[in-house]
Image (cartoon, rainbow, N blue to C red):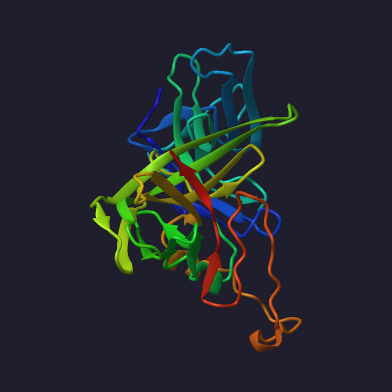
């Protein structure tokens, strides 16, 4: 039976992993198992288990009208550790009334995956305490979830850089979208600025909209199969048809939800990868009546906590081999990343990425 006389206390509400899996030093799970007995109790065994489990489940071809030809169900144990605080075998021992405290500690490797909960998969960690009592007496147990976060390892200047997307549509319209930072935390507002500059007469803007989208990729280990799921988190639009006669400068605002049921943090694990993009769209009517949708995508990071907290969590470097000065690292290398990953950023405060994704009808 579940009993109020067992309490699992943790030194930290959340465990933080700093840096990518290949560079993180890990963290330590610390806490105490506390037994509160109003009167003496006979017990045989007291133990605590810490377990981490990854699970994926999806079907290929599960779209309407499609035959489900393959199901993917994956379960993987990440960690399984048990502390035994008392074990008297077949006998029993009497514990006096009052509080009994058993401390525990476990170093965790930096390459373990962080906590993730999505539609088709989850990575979760759980502490389960057991108090086994003699025959004809009810056993006690209690559980507590352990939430593990991973903070990005980028330098502060990279996290705080503005991102700008600009392009020219058929020599008729110059447009630009921008966000003030690269990373945003839970509950924070994202201000998206946009500029529209007409290069010909007679253009009309029907609307400008911006949405935050989440992309989740599930990997079926060893089966060479994957699934990508995306959904819209939040949305804002400037819906006011008007003629474009001069430069227009506006702003849209989307708010990152606080609840993990609505949004997940960016992550890179073996089974689940999560990315976020701001999707901007301009609907333009040409003088001949043709409606065109101009699309742009701004890759951003959704991180645990806030940007300020993330900057505070950046690792401090100890003295050793002197690092080169900023001025000496010239010129910076421009990195070309695979499609779908956030772009690299130069040493300037603003990085411009030309993107063209246009659909006409």
Q: Is residue 259 visible?
A: no
Q: Nearer the viewer, residue 57 or 39?
A: 57
Number of numbered callouts drawn: 0
Left or right of 17, for residue 251: left
**Whole-percent x and y of residue 354?**
55, 61
Left or right of 74, for residue 262: left
**Whole-percent x and y of residue 210?**
37, 51
**Whole-percent x and y of residue 235?**
33, 47
Residue occupying the far front of the picture = 288
The residue depicted at 41 percent of the width and 46 percent of the height is 292
Q: Is residue 161 above or below residue 267?
A: below
Left or right of 328, for residue 157: left
Q: Nearer the viewer, residue 345 or 289?
A: 289
**Whole-percent x and y of residue 76?**
65, 30
Could you tell me which quadrant the N terminus lies in?
top left
Could you tell me which quadrant the C terminus lies in?
top left
Q: Nearer the viewer, residue 1 or 96?
A: 1
Q: Is residue 178 above or below residue 97?
A: below
């Amino acid at each position: 039976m579940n009993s109020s006389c067992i309490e699992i206390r943790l030194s930290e509400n959340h465990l933080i992993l700093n840096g990518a899996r290949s560079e993180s030093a890990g963290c330590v799970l610390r806490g105490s198992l506390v037994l509160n007995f109003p009167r003496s109790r006979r017990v045989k065994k007291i133990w605590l288990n810490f377990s981490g489990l990854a699970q994926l489940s999806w079907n290929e071809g599960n779209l309407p009208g499609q035959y489900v030809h393959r199901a993917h169900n994956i379960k993987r144990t990440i960690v399984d550790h048990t502390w035994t605080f008392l074990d008297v075998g077949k006998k029993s021992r009497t514990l006096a009334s009052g509080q009994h405290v058993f401390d525990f500690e476990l170093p965790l490797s930096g390459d373990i995956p962080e906590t993730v909960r999505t539609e088709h998969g989850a990575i979760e960690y759980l502490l389960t305490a057991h108090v086994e009592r003699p025959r004809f007496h009810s056993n006690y147990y209690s559980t507590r979830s352990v939430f593990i976060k991973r903070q990005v390892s980028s330098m502060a200047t990279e996290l705080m850089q503005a991102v700008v997307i600009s392009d020219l549509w058929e020599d008729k319209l110059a447009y630009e979208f921008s966000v003030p930072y690269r990373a945003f935390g839970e509950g924070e507002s994202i201000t998206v600025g946009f500029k529209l500059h007409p290069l010909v007469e007679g253009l009309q803007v029907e609307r400008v909209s911006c949405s935050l989208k989440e992309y989740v990729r599930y990997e079926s280990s060893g089966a060479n199969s994957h699934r990508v799921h995306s959904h819209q988190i939040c949305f804002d639009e400037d819906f006011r048809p008007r003629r474009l006669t001069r430069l227009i400068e506006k702003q849209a605002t989307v708010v990152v939800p606080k609840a993990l049921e609505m949004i997940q943090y960016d992550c890179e694990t073996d089974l689940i990868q999560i990315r976020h993009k701001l999707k901007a769209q301009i609907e333009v009517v040409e003088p001949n009546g043709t409606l065109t949708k101009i699309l742009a995508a701004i890759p951003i990071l959704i991180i645990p906590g806030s940007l300020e907290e993330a900057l505070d969590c950046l690792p401090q470097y100890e003295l050793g081999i002197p690092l080169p000065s900023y001025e000496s690292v010239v010129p910076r290398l421009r990195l070309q990343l695979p499609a779908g990953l956030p772009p690299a950023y130069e040493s300037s405060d603003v990085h411009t990425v030309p993107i063209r994704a246009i659909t006409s009808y």
